[in-house]
């Protein structure tokens, strides 16, 4: 295995699996683990005991809890030291997000403040703006919110109709804002809002709007399916006079702020759902140990043990995918000069570099945790449908994650689009990758290694075949729909599913391969890698077969199926046996045993 190479987006397509050293959770430092414990203890002592009161939105309680989080440093992880923050690495920030996610409503409220509430100002504010607000936001003295979505513009953020008009009043220049925002997290108590409006109805721009500004009001709390403890309201702007100095960034450049912040949100959401998934997995295992049917704990039944193994494997894969990206970000950001005048732009470039991986984490994570929680409800049986059990609330809370930070459909369409964008910019050697695939098609079909009890040769081989399938299908899609590919949504979604599976395979294998090289891979690590690779590879093969008839017909389709067959292999992995290994290990440990 090579030494760690410079961080680069989409490197999973460029390097052989295991050739690139990636950051894994086994490498958490003592300081990172200490912050994780602080967050976990805060949740266990301060939040979870009062979860029911928070669910009913007891007046002032969420604000009180957020301010207590500020007291123990959980709101200042990403804040530079000059503004009273801790200025820690992104891995630590993600770890804290993971631990906070054990109660969704608090996680959403805290995340909205430290993420979309504070980061636009941190990344795009001038020195005066940051000095005015950030130190107080870092401690929780004032709380933030982000107001982008409108009743008529959800995924189409630039379709916003809120208007800002430059006016003079008492010798000062103001922007007068009029419009309505909706689904605004923390709206019930936030002190400062990042509001997007169109100057003169055209130039999409961000503004810092204080709650005390005359003309700002909020609607009633939304009656939501889940995350009931969080505040979600409409934000109503009626002739709100915003001082000119509260323009955030440049006039007409609000889209730059909005889209970069959404990228960062996707990055954090993947690991956020991981924390919730791990907690629910623990709850499900403990319940299965206690619940008896036919005088036997249901955890002894093969059907239940299979579910536990599958839930564990998906969370292990998500953990591998997520902290890989955290490591990338820390590599790049750690090398930036914070005092350079273009630091903010370089920081945004670092975040954008991993747009593909961020969207993959968001989509895979939100859907994987949905499945974990769904299976936890199933393990509880009828009790899972009762509000007296934690999995009922988790089931409702989880559903929003497939909508947050851009719907999963939007994110799926972004994935192939950004891969092709990087290829057109020369950042991905597309022609080289296509030539490699064409060479494999022209040659005799490769022979798959035999499965092994001690190694991962078969899985490494399948990982490379998965990459060939992705390049093959993407190349055929481009050839057929070069001019209108962006309009072929079904095709883009299919390509995204292949890319998601490929990145998951590569990340999971890279992690286990590193453990194996260091002599630290256990039988359960190998079992999870085999399970995830086998099932993900079979799934992406099915997707590729389904979309080829959309790309060709007749003899041409026959030829394309024959080409795809060069990368198609029956996977002889004994999944039943592998899942038993994982289930045995997890039922023995009950808690997540792989990282701190």
Image: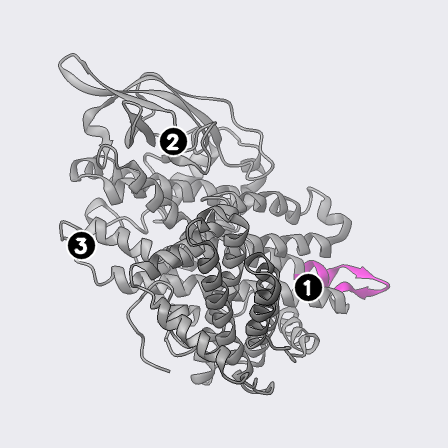
* Residue 570, placed above or below residue 422: below
How packed is label 3: few (under 14 Cα within 10 Å), some, or many (20 or more)? some
- In depth, the one of 124 and 14 nearer the eye is 14
Q: Position of residue 529 (x, y in %)?
A: 55, 74
Q: Nearer the viewer, residue 584 or 468?
A: 468
| Residue 255 image offset from top left, x and y in percent | 31, 39
Q: Which residues are magenta?
A: 285-298
Q: Residues within 10 Å of mark 1 (few under 14, many from 20)?
A: some
Mark 1 vs 2, N-terminal side:
2
Indicate whether 446 appears above or below 594.
Answer: below
| CB-based contact (under 8 Å), mark 3 and mark 1 | no
Query: Looking at the rendering, which quadrant does residue 424 occupy?
Result: bottom left
Residue 101, numbered label: none
Q: Quadrant of residue 544?
A: bottom right
Q: Residue at x 23, y 46 (%)?
A: 84
Front one among 365 and 143: 365
How many numbered circles are shown?
3
Q: Nearer the viewer, mark 2 or mark 3?
A: 3
What mark, if any, has residue 338 been given in the picture? 3
User: Circle 2 sits on which residue?
Assistant: 190
Q: Which residue is mark 1?
A: 307
Q: Is residue 266 magenta?
A: no
**The furthest residue to the front:** 555
Q: Mark 2 or 3 closer to N-term?
A: 2
Instruction: Please state if 532 lies on the left or on the right of 305 as rendered.
Output: left
Badge 1 marks a residue whose secondary structure is helix
Closer mark to the observer between disc 1 and disc 2: 1
């Amino acid at each position: 295995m090579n030494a760690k190479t410079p961080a680069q987006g989409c490197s999973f397509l460029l390097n052989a699996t295991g050739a690139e050293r990636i950051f894994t959770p086994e490498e958490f430092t003592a300081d990172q683990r200490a912050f994780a414990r602080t967050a976990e203890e805060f949740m266990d002592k301060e939040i979870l005991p009062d979860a029911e009161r928070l669910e009913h939105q007891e007046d002032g309680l969420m604000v009180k809890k957020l301010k207590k989080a500020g007291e123990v440093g959980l709101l200042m992880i990403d804040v530079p030291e000059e503004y009273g923050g801790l200025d820690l690495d992104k891995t630590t920030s993600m770890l804290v997000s993971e631990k906070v996610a054990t109660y969704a409503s608090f996680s959403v409220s805290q995340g909205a403040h430290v993420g979309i509430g504070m980061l636009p100002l941190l990344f795009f504010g001038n020195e005066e703006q940051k000095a005015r607000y950030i130190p107080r936001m870092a401690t929780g003295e004032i709380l933030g919110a982000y107001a982008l979505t409108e009743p008529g513009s959800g995924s189409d953020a630039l379709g916003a109709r809120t208007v800002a008009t430059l006016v003079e009043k008492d010798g000062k220049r103001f922007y007068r804002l009029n419009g309505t925002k909706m689904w605004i997290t923390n709206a019930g108590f936030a002190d400062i809002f990042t509001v997007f409006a169109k100057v003169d109805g055209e130039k999409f721009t961000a503004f810092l709007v204080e709650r005390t500004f005359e003309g700002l009001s909020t609607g009633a709390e939304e009656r939501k399916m889940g995350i009931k403890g969080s505040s979600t309201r409409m934000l109503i702007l009626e002739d709100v006079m915003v001082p000119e100095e509260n323009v955030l960034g440049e006039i007409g450049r609000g889209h730059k702020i909005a889209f970069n912040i959404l990228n960062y949100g996707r990055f954090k959401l993947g690991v956020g759902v991981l924390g919730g998934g791990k907690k629910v997995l623990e709850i499900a295992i403990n319940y299965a140990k206690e619940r008896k049917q036919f005088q036997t704990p249901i955890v002894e039944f093969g059907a239940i043990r299979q579910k536990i193994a599958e839930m564990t494997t998906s969370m292990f894969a998500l953990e591998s995918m997520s902290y890989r990206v955290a490591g990338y970000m820390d590599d790049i950001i750690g090398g930036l000069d914070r005092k350079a005048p273009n630091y903010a732009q370089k920081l945004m470039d670092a975040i954008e570099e991993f747009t593909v991986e961020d969207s993959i984490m968001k989509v895979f994570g939100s859907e994987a945790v949905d499945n974990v929680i769904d299976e936890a409800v199933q393990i509880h049986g009828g009790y899972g449908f009762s509000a007296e059990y934690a999995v009922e609330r988790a089931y409702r809370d989880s559903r929003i994650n497939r909508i947050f930070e851009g719907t999963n459909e939007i994110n799926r369409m972004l994935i192939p689009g950004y891969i092709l964008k990087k290829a057109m910019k020369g950042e991905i050697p597309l022609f080289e990758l296509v030539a490699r695939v064409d060479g494999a098609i022209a040659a005799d079909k490769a022979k798959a290694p035999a499965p092994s009890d001690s190694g991962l040769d078969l899985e490494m081989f399948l990982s490379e075949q998965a990459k060939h399938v992705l390049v093959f299908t993407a190349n055929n899609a481009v050839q057929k729909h070069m001019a209108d590919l962006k309009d072929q949504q079904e095709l883009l979604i299919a390509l995204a599913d292949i890319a998601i599976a490929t990145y998951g395979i590569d990340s999971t294998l890279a992690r286990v391969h590193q453990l194996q090289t260091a002599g630290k891979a256990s039988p359960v690590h190998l079992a999870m890698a085999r399970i995830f690779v086998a099932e993900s590879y079979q799934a992406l093969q099915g997707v590729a077969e389904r979309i080829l008839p959309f790309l060709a017909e007749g003899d041409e389709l026959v030829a394309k199926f024959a080409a795809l067959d060069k990368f198609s292999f029956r996977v002889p992995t004994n999944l039943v046996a592998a899942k038993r290994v994982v289930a045995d290990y997890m039922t023995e440990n009950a808690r997540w045993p792989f990282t701190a």
